[in-house]
């Protein structure tokens, strides 16, 4: 049976569930690789690392000098939506759907990229905003279905992993 450390996936490499000695060897190799990127790139490079689980990363990976800037990419907010609507549709101020959209955004987890995708679907602002309302309502139904007794299924799954 293949160990997660053998799969070649960085997320598996950095997860603490691997065999301790093998894990240390792989993590050391990864850190040496990253340090090699810095030394070979010179001063004019930006290297981007992304993760959905920063808490799972070893502190050595996140130390200053390896990762100097941490940017949290949150879900879309009503203010962010207004900026996107202005940029993509040229709608500044108010629109008849803004109130409904902002209420749905507050109740739904949607990324700015998902919102932008809907806003780019049509050059007509009414059509694009109506499409966004449909997306947000669909996501709200999906989010509501993820709740089981007031707890997200993902949190239930995390709890089960911790127990085993």
Image: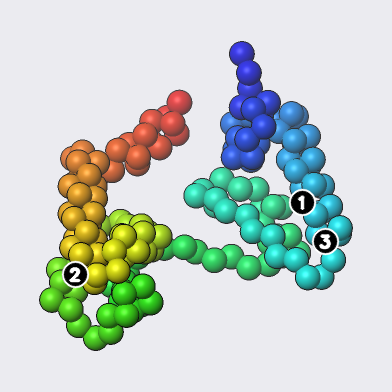
Say the numbered circle drawn on residue 91. none
Say the numbered circle drawn on residue 34. 1
Residue at position x 75%, y 66% in the image: 45
The answer to whether any part of residue 62 appears in the image is yes
- Label 3 crowding class (10 Å Cα cut-off): few <14, some 14-19, many 20+? few
Q: Which residue in the protein does label 3 denote? A: 41
Which is more foreground, mark 3 or mark 1? 3
Q: Which residue in the protein does label 2 denote? A: 126
* Residue 26 spot, x, y in % from top left: 75, 35
Q: CA distance from mark 2 to mark 1?
A: 47 Å
Label 1, secondary structure: give it: helix
Label 3, secondary structure: give it: helix
Q: Tell which circle, 3 or 1, labels the residue nearer the N-terminal end.
A: 1
Using the image as rendered, state which of residue 97 and residue 139 is in the foreground. Answer: 97
Using the image as rendered, state which of residue 144 and residue 63 is in the foreground. Answer: 144
Label 2, secondary structure: give it: helix
For the C terminus, which image quadrant? Answer: top left
Q: CA distance from mark 3 to mark 2?
A: 47 Å
Which is more foreground, mark 3 or mark 2? 2
* Residue 25 spot, x, y in % from top left: 78, 34
> In the rendered image of this protein, does residue 6 appear above or below residue 30?
above
Q: Tell which circle, 3 or 2, labels the residue nearer the N-terminal end.
A: 3
Using the image as rendered, state which of residue 83 and residue 125 is in the foreground. Answer: 125
> Where, by quadrant of the figure, is residue 119 drawn?
bottom left
> In the rendered image of this protein, does residue 94 appear above or below residue 62?
below
For the N terminus, which image quadrant? Answer: top right
Colour scheme in use: rainbow
The answer to whether any part of residue 55 appears in the image is no
> In the rendered image of this protein, does residue 26 appear above or below residue 112?
above
């Amino acid at each position: 049976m293949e160990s997660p450390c053998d799969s070649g996936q960085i997320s598996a490499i950095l997860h603490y569930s691997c065999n301790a000695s093998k894990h240390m060897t792989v993590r050391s190799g990864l850190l040496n690789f990253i340090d090699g990127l810095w030394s070979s790139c010179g001063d004019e490079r930006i290297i981007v690392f992304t993760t959905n689980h920063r808490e799972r990363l070893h502190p050595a990976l996140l130390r200053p000098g390896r990762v100097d800037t941490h940017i949290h990419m949150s879900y879309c907010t009503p203010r962010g939506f207004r900026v996107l609507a202005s940029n993509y549709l040229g709608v500044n101020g108010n629109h008849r759907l803004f109130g409904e959209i902002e209420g749905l955004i507050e109740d739904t987890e949607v990324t700015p990229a998902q919102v932008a995708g809907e806003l780019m679907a049509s050059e007509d602002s009414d059509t694009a905003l109506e499409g966004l309302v449909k997306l947000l309502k669909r996501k709200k139904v999906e989010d509501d279905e993820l709740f089981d007794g007031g707890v997200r299924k993902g949190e239930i799954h995390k709890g089960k992993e911790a127990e085993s």
